[in-house]
Amino acid sequence: MKILTKITIGLAASALLLVGCNGANTSAKSEKSVVKPTITEANLGYRGTDDLLKEDVIPPAVTYHSAPPGASKKFKRAYQDAPPMIPHSTEGLLPITKNNNACLGCHMPDVAASMGATPIPVSHFTSFRPKTEVVGDEILKNGKVIKNTSSEKLANVSIKVDKDEQHLYAGRWNCSQCHAPQATNTLVDDNHFKPVYTAPDGAEKSSWNQSKWLKDINTAK
């Protein structure tokens, strides 16, 4: 009987110790765990509601950086040679028309450094389209007769560069087609994309330069 009593007391003590240890571990885990804020279904959409059929919802107003040109901090490029985003206010600068492009006043290569602006790269002064014309029943590309079919031969390609960088290629004239101002609104979730740049200064500068891209190609204005 005494032996059974001792065994019973020993088992009870062991059970208490186990409960105590488990309780301590649970407490330690609860102290280390961080409860993340819950993202509701209403927060997932820009309209701020989970009622998808509601039509009279007014989304929050979009606000942009208000610093004037020259007084703002430049954004890092999203990836190598990505179009840089506009860090300053665009009030009074848009829309861009064929007769008026206010961006050129600061971003042309000959004045960009003195204005603290990002210079327009040589790619924006380059036309990669072949000169194509129809003469009689023949199709000519760069003066050469070609068949009425697609071709990727270099002989049928013309790259024309304004080497003096004075006149933008017409296809690059509408700056806001690729470059856009950035909103300051709070995001539901931050952007976790981590860019890897192929050039040491890729976060701030374009790798486009005439010696690299056009070294082996005959160019003409």
Image (cartoon, helix red, strand yellow):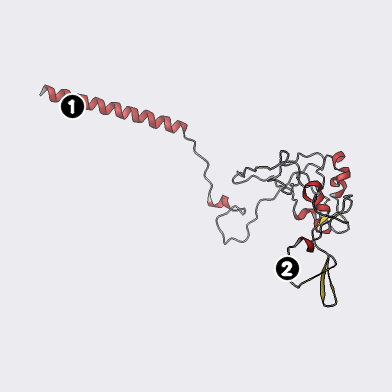
Q: CA distance from mark 1 to mark 2?
A: 92 Å
Percent across and percent down for residue 181 are 74, 48
Label 1 element class: helix
Q: In this picture, is 100 found above or below 10? A: below
Between residue 194 and residue 151, name the one nearer to us.
Answer: 151
Mark 2 residue type: Ser
Percent across and percent down for residue 94 are 81, 53
Residue 1 picture quarter: top left
Please tell me which residue is depicted at 80% across the width and 43% down the height of the picture: 118
Between residue 161 and residue 109, name the one nearer to us.
Answer: 161
Q: Which mark is residue 150?
A: 2
Q: Is residue 221 left or right of residue 57?
A: right
Q: Is residue 60 left or right of residue 19?
A: right
Residue 221 picture quarter: bottom right
Q: Is residue 11 left or right of residue 160?
A: left
Q: Are marks 1 and 2 in contact (CB under 8 Å)?
A: no
Q: Which mark is residue 218?
A: none
Mark 1 residue type: Thr
Callout 1: few (<14), some (14-19), or many (20+) C-alpha neighbours within 10 Å? few
Residue 5 picture quarter: top left
Considering every residue shown, the one lying at the far bottom of the view is 137
Q: Which mark is residue 8?
A: 1
Percent across and percent down for residue 75 are 73, 42
Q: In this picture, is 55 found above or below 208? A: below
Q: In this picture, is 172 found above or below 77? A: below
Percent across and percent down for residue 76 are 71, 41
Between residue 50 and residue 145, name the one nearer to us.
Answer: 145
Q: Going from the N terminus, do you reach mark 1 or mark 2 first?
A: 1
Callout 2: few (<14), some (14-19), or many (20+) C-alpha neighbours within 10 Å? few
Labels 1, 2: front one:
2
Label 2 element class: loop
